[in-house]
Image (spheres, coloured by chain):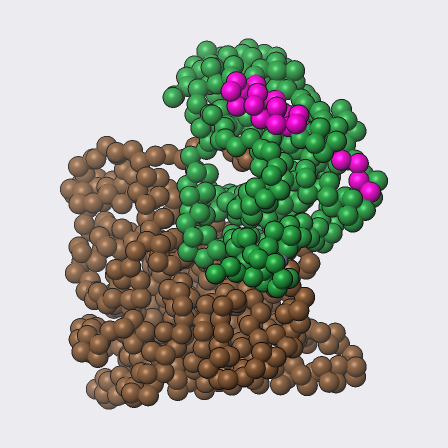
Chain colours: A green, B brown
Amino acid sequence: MPVQCSSCALSRAVLKRPKTGHSLCKACFFWAFEEEVHHTVVSGRLFSRGETVGIGASGGKDSTVLAHVMKVLNERHDYGLKLLLLSVDEGITGYRDDSLETVRRNQQQYDLPLKIVSYQELYGWTMDAIVKQVGLKNNCTFCGVFRRQALDRGAVMLNVDKICTGHNADDVAETVLMNVLRGDIARLRRCTAISTASDGEGAIPRCKPLKYAYEKEIVLYAYFKKLDYFSTECIYSPNAYRGHARAFLKDLEAVRPSAIMDVIHSGENLSVKEGVKMPVQGTCTRCGYISSQALCKSCVLLEGLNRGLPKLGIGKHHRLHGKILAQQPLTQEEEKKLKAVDF
Amino acid sequence: MCQVDEEYSGHLERRSVPGVSKTCVKCKESTAVLIIRLGDAFCRSCFKEYFVHKFRAMLGKNRVIFPGEKVLLAVSGGPASSSMLAQVQEGLSRDAPKKLRFVPGIIYIDEGGACGQSAEEREKAVALLENILRKTGFPYYIVPLEQVFGLPDSVLESVSCSPEGSGLSYKAAVVQYIQQNEVKQRHSESAGEEAQDAMARLSVHSQYGPEHRQALERLFSSLKTLTAKEDMLQTLRQHLILHTARVSGYSKVMMGDSCTRLSIKLLSNISLGRGAALAADTGFSDPRYGDVVIVRPMRDYSSKEIAFYNRLFGVQSVFIPGLDTKVPDKASIQRLTESFIIKLQADFPSTVSTIYRTSEKLHTACPPLNSSAEPAVKCLLCLCALDTKADEASAFQAILLSERLSVGKAQSDPPSSTTAGSPGQSCCQESGCGAGGCCSTSRASADLKSLLCYSCRLTMKDMTAVDSLPQYITLEAEKRQRRAQMKQEISEFLLEDADDDQE
Ligand SMILES: [Zn+2]
Ligand SMILES: [Zn+2]
């Protein structure tokens, strides 16, 4: 027996919303999904008229749907934004090649300008080369730090006012859980914020218009809109701890579908003691990017790679920053500690 | 998408086998009998000292229990609360300088009626437990959960929050206690036996009638998910403890939550949408009830330490099956979280302590102290401050919008809505009211919702018959609604922000 759409009560429902359990027809689902993102954009005051907004495009489902929905909403609600696509080429053979192809196709379909910045061009290192030196244990640290700066630098080249990324509700909830597991109270407090402020000179404000969109609904949206995306996990294994948080969230969702939103609600309502120290943001003395230390993480990691001491940026070696800045050689003992990489 | 957006340096250490030393790390003489943390091997007597000291240190550090104060120990029969009871006995039996100086009583809530146990099973469990309780010489209260159907609605009234007792400083309380005690000492010889008698008379083993048993069964079968059942059980248990404490003049309640238990509670409460009340739910003290403060003196012990102590020093505990006994891992959010943490702890031994430290950095708010303003609006069920007045840019508003957009315009008008937000739930058919009309159940559920916090709303959403709630809850709900209505009627004449009190 066909189920009727619970919204229009006219058409036949084609899907059951993972977020609410309602049965909807295609048109009503599209409308609900898009208007929810619109509500997120408006209520969070994510953009102002006339701004140039860079959409972080990886070729994956989240950023593909984000690019599509942003284009639709910009026209439907007359945001008055100039949209463009911003991609990072990490230099991972067999992973990025294909997904960048997808981004290029998106560029043509949506008729949006595209800028690709590569690790090779920014740092002189591809991820493939980095993995060769550091192995598979800490490579995600390098990639994460480098990507963050790469997006910013690409945005600066294109005079972008704001960057939006495809982080969805599952990603945010997962980050809340992970920060609890890691006891990282500073990040726990920050991670549910929908946008990062524009303080700090090197960083461009970022926001997450899909913050309240379920991953499953993003896939449903892409499927019914026949959007073209490239779906694969990064070939270099992800952070094991995040893996635990992710698996746990999936189980929670299976027990109670609202759990994803419930975790985000929790994260948004935590109150942290005033006495708890939060790191002070300054700027990196070498590259000018925001940093709580004399040298930003990216510069330390790069220094480590270039000196053949990959562990330099991984542990806490703040006291060595002075030596690096002064271009002094490290002692033999210091070198020994930083060289060994356990696989 | 790849989630490694921020720098996450440092990896967690996996379990490594410590080098077992044969002698105690503390006295360096006796043979070690156990290892508690990595590498810390203790002999029997040093372990005892360490364990006992930790209890006193926890109370000493927080200074919330006043000398002479009546403290109700909530005991479940499990290892942690049994160990807590043993610590209190130990502390009271000591000599002057190290003696604990509060007056204990014990409460046990018999939840068998909510867990489908037979009357015989329940009697047997209670008899075993009563055996242990009687030996302590403390007054005790054995309260069946069915008693919630006899609670007065005053349980849910907000009592203004007055931390640190009635304005008395800790130091002044100590002085007062010592003076009073000197007087008591002089009379003690003759009064000794009488006191024993009085204590025995104080112990209460409440009974319950068949109508209450059925009402409880109906209430729990009306909750469709185990997650909601566990949440409701927790709420009702707290109400009973709170009521007993008030009636019998206890101003503190001690809960036996261990560090392991609290880590599980912290993560499961986050998953249940209880983030706003996390500090109160997992901190050392929970001031939400105002006149009765919950304290958790066992929060520094891991469940492993407790098990060791109980075994080495013969602390008795009773296994009493609960709602989540013998259910699969994915049966409820609470159960799932527990098995997740226990498994993770096995691989990463710092898991529990890391999560526990998170709870220490959270803020325990005691909001209703600001001048003349009315106390903050509290959730009808869990009595935490309402967290549902979030601004537009919030998960709470986002999910409301998703529900509105999914039911369409025709049905989303609140007054005529019958079962908005819960498709397939056609409670109207039985009572025979038409499509446009409104049956009492859905009406009551809509009204009740506005009085609840985010998480308690989730629990009520899983409930099919709102009228199965105990009367003290529905009566208090009606009272609050009448008041809100009253306030609305006179709102134009009120000078203060009149919206303060209502949804
Ligand atoms: Zn429809
Ligand atoms: Zn509540």
What residue is at 76 percent from the left and 24 percent from the top? Answer: A157
Is A273 a magenta residue? Answer: no
At a point 29% along the width and 33% down the height, the residue shown is: B16
The answer to whether B248 appears left or right of B5 in the picture is left
Compare residues A127 and B223 and report the one nearer the observer: B223
Q: Residue furthest front?
A: A1
Q: Quadrant of residue B199?
A: bottom left
State the image coordinates of residue A268 (x, y, percent, origin top left).
Answer: 59, 54
Going by the image, does A182 lie left or right of A5?
Answer: left
Q: Look at the image and tell me in which quarter the N terminus of chain B lies.
A: top right
Name the residue rendered at 38%, 44% in the picture. Answer: B351
Whether A177 is drawn above or below A154: the answer is below
Task: Please tell me whether residue A97 belongs to the stretch shown in magenta.
Answer: yes
- Ligand 1, seen in the image, is in the quarter at bottom right
Tell me if residue B183 comes above or below residue B295 in the rendering: below
Q: Is residue B415 something one can see in this rendering?
A: yes
Q: Where's residue B285, x and y in %?
A: 46, 64
Residue A255 in the image: state x and y as whole percent: 41, 56
Q: Residue at x 26, y 34 (%)?
A: B18
- In front: A289, or A7? A7
**Quadrant in which the C terminus of chain B appears:** bottom right
For residue A141, side relative to residue A137 (left or right): right
Looking at the rendering, the stretch of residues picked out in magenta corresponds to A79-105
The front one of A100 and A335 is: A100
How many discs appear?
A: 0
